[in-house]
Amino acid sequence: MIHSLLVANRGEIACRVFRTCRDLGITAVAVYSDADADALHVREADLAVRLPGAAPADTYLRGDLVVAAALAAGADAVHPGYGFLSENAGFAAAVQEAGLVWVGPPVKAIELMASKTRAKELMAGAGVPLLAPVDPAMADEDNLPLLLKAAAGGGGRGMRIVRELGALPGELQAASAEAASAFGDGEVFAEPYVERGRHVEVQVMADAHDTVWALGTRDCSLQRRHQKVIEEAPAPGLDDSLRERLHEAAVAAARAVGYRGAGTVEFLVSAEGRPYFLEMNTRLQVEHPVTEAVFGLDLVALQLRVAEGEPLPQPEPPQPSGHAVEARLYAEDPARDWQPQTGTLLALEVPDAPGLRLDAGYTGGDTIGVHYDPMLAKVIAHAPTRPGAVRLLARALERARIHGPVTNRDLLVRSLRHPDFAAARLDTGFYDRHHAGLTAPGPGDPATAALAAALAEAVRRTAPAQAVRTGARAEAVRPAALAEAVQPGALAAGGPPPVRFGAWRNVPSGPQRKRYRGEPDGAEHEVAYRTPRTGAPEPYDAPGVRVLAVRPDRVTLELDGVTRHFTITTDPDADRVYVDTPGASYTFTALPRFTDPATHTAPGSLLAPMPGTVVRVADGLAAGAAVEAGQPLIWLEAMKMEHRILAPASGTLTALHAVPGHQVEVGALLAVVQEDPAPAPVPEETA
């Protein structure tokens, strides 16, 4: 029996495993880096052991330190979670050699599936359908498009799509370099890229008593940068024969390697319905909750049962019920090339309702750093039908309170409500086709939300934190325009006298103006309001809007006869205000009256879009080099992803400050490109 379990991981998956530990009466042991000293998984553990350092290579990827931590804490067993060392055969062997129970598959199974190239050879012998590999050295136009993949690891690292033969050598080099950096193995292989293919996988669970369950299918086709965003079970739109073929292939793959525990066999399904083996993940998957919801199982509890040598509860898996959909909530900006975001997460609250589940690695007040994956949480919805589950999930995300760094929440809601998703027209090119529409400004009403923020601020500065009610007809939002210089901040009756300085006069009953910049779109909104002698702020010059109630954290307005509520949260340290409504959420930054000239940079300056590490610069790049518009110049690594810094225009590199290996802060000057002058117009010839 396992009495004490160390989870060799962090964040959401560590918290998820600890939840099952509590249910089973098992002591939960965490490990943590210095960057995670106050992380949620540390707070939820019964015991925690420090791994000195911050970077993954110094902490969570140090198998020797993790094993030592387990022994120091008196743990009986180690659960690897996903990522980090979860598919590292050497780590699994070290855990067992230390006398600890390994909550995972046999070391031999991990070794056989660790290399995608070797795994494909093994699967061919087991009769599992495969894509024919392509030798990059022999590739020609008939082989295009090609998909380059790292032989080790996953998560989209070292993966490239090649559509032009001339780009193949450079992409091979880039893929190999990224794979070596991420996994310590630069081996890359090529195979045909299947256009409009679906990513469909089968969850397997096996014990040491010759029982292998195939727990249905999952569709994970909605991906960005080859990483999953939305997953669901069962995979919609598959006929019975295809489902049966996938189940049989997954069971054959598991039996071929003597598998035990939880694993996932991944397939690419072509538009014609032909399945091809991709890889087998010898661990628990991020998207396992949708399978748990449909089958009514706790997969972590089953992992522990199998690790203790017990058989699965029955020869056949339970019958599935209903449909489940999962959305991964990332701290990233989809409109800006999916750039990860950092900072303080002020609030993360998802409505609690039947059929909803939240697996989170953060709570309000936690800090999102640069060292780890930007996933904050997973929201899962389960309902009797697919449309019901999709509707429940979209509404839950829409009503969630998420304050702090920019997230992909709006993209998730729009994705779930997109006609192609609703009709189950799914493939891995979904975001390539629909990205622009899914990240465009939405149909909401940010101007009225900005008005609500300004009214709440007026009350917060001038009145006690209690509702101020008025029946007076208000006069709403003025169009954004350059405001005349007025001292900000109306003062309620009974407050200090009007402030006078320079040529300005602050009159409490006169119109006050407030400017906000919306995030992440950058649109500016100017609102005007006044505070009459009654002390209740009201909009200025906007017929049809009536203020029903105003307090610092909540504003109620009547707009064209419809009552609407606005919940206001202020972050004074960042001059930000968050406005949540039942149908949309808005983030505003209060703008100063005058522009700070220090915020301007020289034309052509390349600034770090996020804190991270410079991993490389373009070959031969130095001051004085000629560059082309759109040419990748610098590669930054942040939150487990590489980001390219491109030349903004064709011209000359006049300065290069980026050095491989150096860490940079957001906004750091990396390089400067001086744009080539436009050629002088050629005079027309005259007769």
Image (cartoon, rainbow, N blue to C red):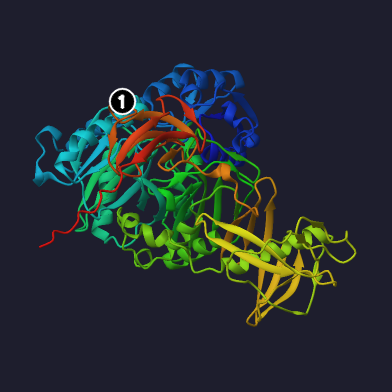
Which residue is depicted at the point 42% across and 42% down? 285
Residue at 60% over, 18% down: 72
Q: Position of 151 compared to 308: left or right?
A: left
Where's residue 486, x and y in %? Answer: 71, 61
The residue at which mark 1 appears reads as 185
The quadrant of the rendering that contains the C terminus is bottom left
Residue 168 against residue 348 in the figure, above or below: above
Label 1 packing within 10 angstroms: few (<14), some (14-19), many (20+):
some
Residue 552, can we see it? no
Residue 608, position in %: x, y? Answer: 46, 37
Judge from the rendering whether residue 544 lies leftward or rightward of residue 405; answer left or right: right
**SS of the residue under disc 1:** loop
**664 and 15: which one is in front?**
664
- Residue 347 visible in rendering: yes
Relative depth, front residue between 442 and 391: 442
Farthest residue in the right direction?
494
User: In the rendered structure, which amino acid carries the disc numbered 1?
Assistant: Asp
Q: Residue 335: x percent and y percent?
A: 43, 53
Percent coordinates x, y for residue 674 in the rendering: 36, 39
Classify the position of the N terminus by image quarter.
top right
Residue at coordinates 24% horizontally, 36% vertically from top-left?
Answer: 171
465 and 180: which one is in front? 465
